[in-house]
Image (cartoon, rainbow, N blue to C red):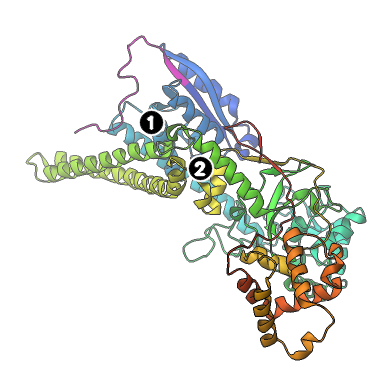
Amino acid sequence: MQQGTAAHPDHDRAESETIGVAAYTRVSTAEQRHRYGIPVQRQAIQAYVERHSTWHLVEYRQDDGASGSTDSRPGFDALIEDIAAGQVQRVVVHRLDRLGRTEAAIWRCVWQIEDAGAQVECCVEPLGDPGIERWLTIDRLAREVEADYRRIVTRTQSGRQLKAVAGGWPGGPAPYGYRLAGKGTFGSVLEVDPAEAGVVALIADLLTEGRRSLKEVTTELNGRGVRTRSGRQWTPSNLSRRLGSGTFLGEAVFRRTDRQWGGHCTSVDGDGRPVHGESVSLALPPILTVDQVQAVGEALAAMSRPRRNPIAEYPLTGRIRGRCGLPYVGGLRGKDGLRTYRCSGMQGTRSCGCVFLPAAHAEEQMAERVNGVLASMPAGSRPGAPTSAAAMRLVRHGARVTLLDRLTAERRQDLQEARGTTAPVHLAAAAVRQIESDLGTLGRIAAHARDWLHELEAEILRDAPLLTVLASLTPDMRVLPPREQRRLVELLDVRVEVADPTFRYREGTTCLTTRWHQRTGELIPPDPSDAQWDRVEVLLRSWFPAHHFRSPLDLRAALTGMLHRLRSGILWSELPTRFGDRVNVRVRQRVWLESGVWEAITRLLNEEGRGTPVFRRPLPPLLIRTALDAEQVA
């Protein structure tokens, strides 16, 4: 039978040529506690390498506390880069479970190492030369690793389930307001923590009696010197998390199925039911009365609102720094819904002094800078160009899947021949069993290979818009949706600073008419000519009753003053008296805007196309850097 797999990395090497070897080690947190650590693995690998005269140990790569259920880890990713650079031809692990704790994770690590140009070796059990026998060995060991992992998970989860059903605390930190009694024993339970219980009662009073917002509650707590469990100041975000815990819900739920986000959530099946056991409600020693719990719930419901600032909609979140050095985060301004970036230092009890940035301004300046940097580079030398690692992995892995399909077809043909052979019955039966076993193994490997192939294809499709921009002769990142812009920002390591830390916005709020022009893009027309004013006056008289024109205010002069203020950006208090009484002019403009006649007036006066943009107050200058250029003030 044909032995199909990737070529052996050493076939083209001379017998005496030194082979570069990398030692890969990994431990999880649980294993560190049980003293199965990095030194043990290193000693075994070093002894194994020393038994091969042509092998030379060139480096150690390790992942501390890394999960074995994933195939991407910092140490492993660096190892792949070293292999691709030609520094390593062999990767040695103590046991195969150091690559992963599931079949899929192990195979993907093996394939990534092979595609980069090296081969995996195991200290405990030889994997064999390249070929189907090697695949059969890896499959057997990988199945043993996953079976062992599943037994550990089942045993651990069953113990936690039994403990929860018995009324004990199943594990993890105690909810705020409680502490563990009998920690580390099977009978550990929650008891009220007197110090934290007083804070819980205070929070409940502030929420229910004062009907305060979360920000107001945190300001009050910090003002009284109350700190969180970790000793930090309260913020609306950490208070919100505490309010969602069992303390303020009246009970704790083990294996919650209504919170399926983040890295720590209950595993559920296709029907949404917990995989490792049913949900268990744990009664908590009361801190609040039933009425207080209900009142807190009502107060939270009254102030709840959906999250409005996901990071994907704000590509520069975390990338901007102000005078205090803390990162800016994106969000909507409450009073007018404007997309902005604000310094995270403003969430404390006092403002840090950093100015907010309109998101459109910051993102436009960033886009211009990034587009200029990319346009100055040849398309082939830009980061993440179409010849990406993902595309190369897809090509190599696609060939592997084709090879697996061919080997499977050959084994099926062998099976047909074995069933029709004239050999003795016991020999034919043994051959059939072996071929059927090989087919089962190839089927499992092919299933894992196709799953990874689909993920690689999805990655290429996901990257297509970004790669199109990077390959363009005139790149423009503004055509990308915010999520893809965020990826490009991270790829280029874009960093933004407020160039003038002393910059301050002008006092006063933007008037409604200015906001309307900014939102609609309607230009400010020139002052009306005599003929145009006659038409405007007819329009006004068709819109308003006669008493609207009995005011001593000269409406033509007032209109001219309104246009002058919108063009120049002066404050109402700075409006020259030649345009009429400032208060009356301001009131008349608001009436015209609210009635809708202002839109009709501006369109009439803009018929000749000589309008100018509405005044926009100066915005802070930004210092924009990327990993590809020197700093430049936008």
Expressed as whole percent of the image width and height from the top left, the position of residue 630 reads 63, 30
Q: Is residue 627 above or below residue 536?
A: above
Image coordinates of residue 105 in percent, x first then y, are: 45, 41
Name the residue type under label 2.
Thr
Residue 398, placed above or below residue 568: above
- Reading the image, the residue beneath label 1 is 114
Counting from the top left corner in percent of width and height, residue 546 is at: 75, 90
- Crowding around mark 2 (Cα neighbors within 10 Å: few <14, some 14 to 19, many 20+) is some
Q: Quadrant of the N terminus?
A: top left
Q: Nearer the viewer, residue 222 or 581?
A: 581
Is 148 placed above or below 168 here?
Answer: above
Q: Which residues are magenta?
A: 1-21
Q: Is residue 182 left or right of residue 468?
A: right
Q: Quadrant of the C terminus?
A: top right
Mark 1 residue element: helix
In this figure, which residue is indicated by the disc labeled 2? 70
